[in-house]
Image (cartoon, rainbow, N blue to C red):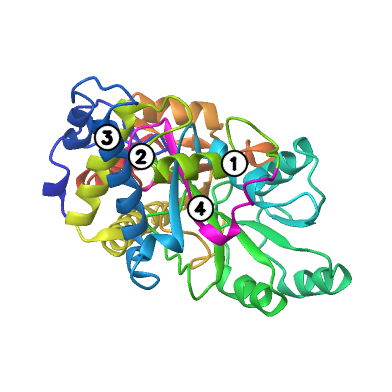
């Protein structure tokens, strides 16, 4: 990707927070498409097109024989990434199932909160927020709990920027026939997700992060055979994926969808495909992330995690000496850059920089120069 692909954002602020992201003019202009009733055929066509586009991001359109959509489905929701996560967990873990939640950040812990609220039988494997997943502890816990049917894990833990190792986890789960539910909210579209080889049952994601769409639309990509049977009483009305999938297969929707954000997502997915898909986006993010990492290292700002542990989507850094986050944030914002704070016990020690959205190499070079001027 080059700067020419994002010629102007029409925004004063460069958003380096992990979503919402800066929009390209092309995606923003898609919001100006005609007003549309969600019960009309035109909306049905738009919705179906997005569902196919989402499967194509990771080449899932070719899975299966004769009828590729019979194995995988993309289910669209109006709501944030958390809505998609809650829909996935509450729909796909049955009442006689048992869920293991892996926690090494805020978003893993959020999955546990979802399970608790919906009265799902679950246990946790907890880690310090800056720690990688302990595979030996995972195996031991699974050996001690042979009744676990599902495992939920965050792919990119935005708390720290860590990219969790799904390859090892997937192999362990496949050996035990445990279904894997993945929070891919901030990795879908920029990091590898090998649905078939890793045995992923479902993953939840959103439009307004690596896909560069507008906040308001999220989705779950799932194996159709993981959906509950028609006679199962759902835990939730609005977030029941079985109902959504059934009606979307027929061209309908159970509830009013956010039509304008659908327009934007369809355009964002087309823009991404034309630019080379998730692999090209990964490469572009990596280039920007390395630029920032090297630039900040040259003035003594250290990353929270060692090189190779973070995603290309977001990196966390220790605050410069003698700066509070608030002071650092405000001085950068005065120069048109929005960074993101740490959470919990990291709030006073780190800041986070994301490379998502319609931002250019020039933007990031200027960001590094502004940081150098400030400190």
Say whether residue 76 is left or right of residue 200. Answer: left
Mark 4 to mark 1 CA distance (whole Å): 14 Å
Q: Earlier in the sequence, mark 2 or mark 4?
A: 4
Residue 335 seen anywhere in this rendered image of the structure: no
Q: Which residue is mark 4?
A: 184
Mark 2 Cα within 10 Å, few/some/many (few <14, many 20+)?
some
Q: Quick one: which residue is furthest to the bottom in this view? A: 175
Mark 2 to mark 4 CA distance (whole Å): 26 Å
* Badge 4 vs badge 3, beta-carbon distance below 8 Å: no
Which of the labelled discs sits on residue 87, or is there none?
Answer: 1
Q: Earlier in the sequence, mark 4 or mark 1?
A: 1
Q: Nearer the viewer, mark 4 or mark 1?
A: 1
Q: Nearer the viewer, mark 3 or mark 1?
A: 1
Which of the labelled discs sits on residue 251, or is there none?
Answer: 2
Mark 3 to mark 1 CA distance (whole Å): 22 Å
Q: Which residue is mark 3?
A: 264
Mark 2 to mark 1 CA distance (whole Å): 20 Å
């Amino acid at each position: 990707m080059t700067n020419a692909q994002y010629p102007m954002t029409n925004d004063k602020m460069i958003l380096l927070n992990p979503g919402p992201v800066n929009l390209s003019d092309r995606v923003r202009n898609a919001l100006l498409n005609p007003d549309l009733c969600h019960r009309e055929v035109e909306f049905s066509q738009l919705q179906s097109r997005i569902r196919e586009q989402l499967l194509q991001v990771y080449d899932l359109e070719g899975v299966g024989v004769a009828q590729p959509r019979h194995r995988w489905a993309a289910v669209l929701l109006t709501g944030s990434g958390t809505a998609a996560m809650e829909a996935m967990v509450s729909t796909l873990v049955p009442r006689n199932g048992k869920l293991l939640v892996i926690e090494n950040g805020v978003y893993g812990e959020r999955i546990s909160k979802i399970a608790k609220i919906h009265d799902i039988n679950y246990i946790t494997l907890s880690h310090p927020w800056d720690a990688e997943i302990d595979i030996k502890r995972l195996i031991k816990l699974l050996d001690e709990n042979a009744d676990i049917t599902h495992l939920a894990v965050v792919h990119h833990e935005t708390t720290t920027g860590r990219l969790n190792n799904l390859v090892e986890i997937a192999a362990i789960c496949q050996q035990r026939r445990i279904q894997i539910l993945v929070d891919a909210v901030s990795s879908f579209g920029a990091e590898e997700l090998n649905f078939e080889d890793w045995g992923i049952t479902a993953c939840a994601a959103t439009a307004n992060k690596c896909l560069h769409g507008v906040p308001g639309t999220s989705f779950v990509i799932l194996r159709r055979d993981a959906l509950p049977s028609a006679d199962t009483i759902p835990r939730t009305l609005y977030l029941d994926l079985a109902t959504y999938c059934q009606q979307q297969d027929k061209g309908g929707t159970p509830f009013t969808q956010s039509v304008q954000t659908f327009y934007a997502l369809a355009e964002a997915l087309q823009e991404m495909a034309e630019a080379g898909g998730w692999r090209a986006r990964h490469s572009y993010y990596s280039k920007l992330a390395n630029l920032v990492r090297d630039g900040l290292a040259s003035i003594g700002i250290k990353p929270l995690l060692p090189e190779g542990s973070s995603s290309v989507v977001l990196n966390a850094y220790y605050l410069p000496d003698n700066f509070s986050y608030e002071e650092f944030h405000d001085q950068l914002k005065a120069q048109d850059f929005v960074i993101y704070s740490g959470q919990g016990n990291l709030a006073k020690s780190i800041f986070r920089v994301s490379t998502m959205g319609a931002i250019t190499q020039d933007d990031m070079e200027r960001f590094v120069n502004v940081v150098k001027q400030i400190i």
